[in-house]
Amino acid sequence: MDFEYVENMPTESHNSVLGKDFGDVIYGADAQQLWLKMMAAGPVIASPLDPKHVVTTTAEASNQVLRDPGVFSSGPDALYFGSDTGAIPLQIDPPDHSRYRKLLDPLFTPKLMNAREDQIVAIVNRLIDQFIERGSCDFSNEFALPFPSEMFLTLMGLPMSELDSFQRVKEDMIRPAGNTDEERIAKQGEASMWIVNFINSAMAERETKETDDILSYFLKLEKEGILTREETLNICILFIPAGLDTVTDSLENAFAYLAQHPEHRKQIVDNPDLIHLAVEELLRYETPVPSVVRITRQDTEVSGCPLSKGTRVRVSLAAINLSETTVANPMDVDFTREINPHVAFGAGIHRCVGSYLARIELRVALREWHKRIPEYVLQPGFELKYRRGLREIDQLPLVFG
Ligand code: HEM
């Protein structure tokens, strides 16, 4: 597959240079090779997915986009996320964005997240208990999917008895089944309504009984006139794709890598003190959110490429993570890499709110799993399939014991 550097090309005439299968291969098993090829093609390349859509592939071009939200907006016209006014805070531009971040950042500090460690250890071990004797597991369905959902219900103070329903509804929200667009949209609508009712009724309970959780914090802000109910619901709904599937996908990518690279796995089994570095390195190399999207608010230029107002710019975080300007020898997966300024959590004002939560979830999962299951492989003969969207694996059957 060949790529073409977009130089002085008016947006209207962008040609497809990545090929029709761009979307499928970009997230596939050999995605890193493709990301390198994209980088070699130049800092701004055209996308076949949308004629008014370009991809930035170098750290310099991408950082320019991520760090200038006045020109490169993340509003809902960049990528529709189900809300016309924009998912909060992901699709809110300055100056309003900082108001929301000031409210949300204190909920996910390293201190608060570290204090949750015992709860996270308990969830991870309870999940492992359910399949360890069997000697095999469907890693996605039995571990990577339920783990962040349980954590979400715990942090929000929502009833764990609803875990199964919540997981079903979450799937309908993100990957609605259906033969037609109408069917899928209807399914998504029903799922969002279920979540709204679920949260509203939990908030109503807190009117009489205050608890120490995120929903009580939001209720307090509502009473002080700082948040409206609509904003609370908007934020909670964004937490679902932003905070659940990203962790599921990072776990799948990490365990798929470790299952296929026994020498790396042995390194963390023999020396668990390396796990925090291994988590960062796997986030860098695999980049579970391979790209983020912005839209130009005015005519502008990126690395010599003029872009007209209204151009969608897909920033390849994966390419930044594989760039020599980010780390030395980027194609080496090195669990002893101490300095690792990757952008798996994004960069600029929209950098991930939940990065400390994600990190502790991933570290505890790797630590507890490898204490109990040090040896495992991908089910022999099974071929991994990666889905489009985030870098996620369809099914990950592991065999151990
Ligand atoms: C390993 C797991 C995760 C990864 C790889 C990840 C990745 C990212 C990335 C790349 C962005 C930037 C999006 C952009 O610039 O358009 C982001 C934003 C965000 N993430 Fe995460 N995330 C993860 C876990 C979480 C968790 C656990 C939460 C739970 C609270 C969360 C909540 C958010 C929110 C609310 C934003 C929007 C921030 C803003 O716009 O200011 N993420 N995440």
Image: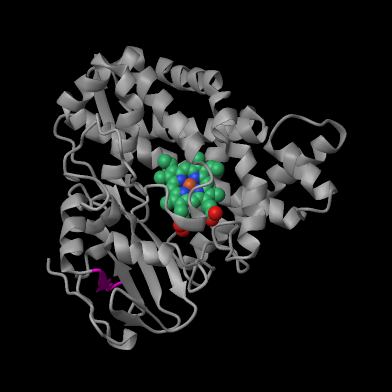
For the C terminus, give its image quadrant.
top left
Residue 178 position, x and y percent, is 45, 58
Whether residue 237 is situated above or below residue 133 in the rendered picture: below
Residue 177 can be seen in this image:
no
Outermost residue, right direction? 208
Whether residue 171 is situated above or below residue 366 in the rendered picture: below
Q: Residue at x 30, y 23 (%)?
A: 274
Residue 351 position, x and y percent, is 48, 51
- Which residue is nearer to you in this view: 280 or 304? 304
Q: Residue at x 12, y 66 (%)?
A: 1
Residue 183 can be seen in this image:
yes
Give the image quarter of residue 93: bottom right
Whether residue 42 is situated above or below residue 329 in the rendered picture: below
Give the image quarter of residue 295: bottom left
- Look at the image and say whether residue 46 sits in the magenta stretch: yes
Q: Which residues are magenta?
A: 43-49
- Which residue is nearer to you in this view: 93 or 370? 93
Residue 243 position, x and y percent, is 51, 43
- Which residue is nearer to you in this view: 173 or 271? 271
Whether residue 61 is situated above or below residue 102 in the rendered picture: below
Horizontal arrangement in the rendering, residue 163 relative to residue 130 (left or right): right
Q: Residue at x 76, y 53 (%)?
A: 227
